[in-house]
Image: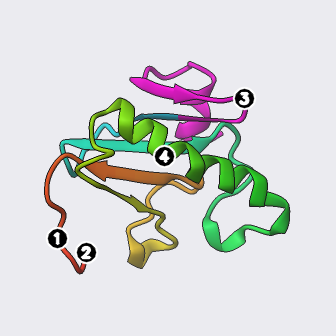
């Protein structure tokens, strides 16, 4: 069981900001911006984006579609926010459980990394 599954099961405390039946969003414990939220499926069946299939499209779409609601709730919808999905060690993936980073609250540099 991944760390994120334990958070979803409420076995590990997290500051949850949004939740639907099969995914939730919470503050990252190591924020890289003033607003740094992780949007994660409640199960770890999908370890990373590169393993997704067309059968995952509904869940992935709903997770992405929730991002403006979350951004608005946290006050970064109008100023702007970034969504990031890492795949593999070179991209910075550290937890083998698909997750979307929502970052905002300051000007974000481009290119990232």
Q: Residue at horizontal 56%, vertical 19%? A: 10
Q: Which residue lies furthest to the right in this view?
A: 55
Residue 55, position as x, y percentages in the image: 85, 61
Disc number for residue 60: none
Give x and y (percent) for residue 109: 16, 70
Q: Residues within 10 Å of mark 3 (few under 14, many from 20)?
A: few
Q: Mark 1 points at which residue?
A: 109
Region in magenta: 1-24
Q: Which of marks 1 and 4 is nearer the N terminus?
A: 4
Mark 4: secondary structure = helix
How many angstroms separate mark 1 from mark 3 (CA)? Answer: 34 Å
| CA–CA distance in space, label 1 to label 4 | 20 Å
Q: In which quarter of the image is residue 26?
A: top left
Which residue matches tag 4? Answer: 67
Residue drawn at 53 percent across, 38 percent down? 3
Of residue 4 and residue 67, the one placed in the foreground of this image is 67
Distance from disc 3 to disc 2, alpha carbons, whole Å, reads 32 Å
């Amino acid at each position: 069981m991944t760390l994120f599954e334990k958070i979803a099961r409420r076995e590990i405390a997290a500051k949850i900001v949004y939740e639907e039946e099969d995914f939730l969003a919470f503050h990252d414990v190591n924020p890289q911006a003033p607003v740094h939220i992780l949007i994660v499926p409640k199960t770890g069946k999908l370890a990373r984006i590169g393993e997704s299939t067309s059968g995952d499209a509904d869940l992935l779409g709903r997770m992405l579609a929730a991002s403006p609601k979350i951004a608005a709730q946290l006050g970064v919808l109008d100023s702007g926010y970034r969504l990031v999905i890492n795949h593999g060690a070179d991209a910075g993936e550290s937890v083998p459980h698909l997750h979307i980073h929502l970052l905002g609250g300051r000007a974000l540099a481009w290119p990232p990394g």
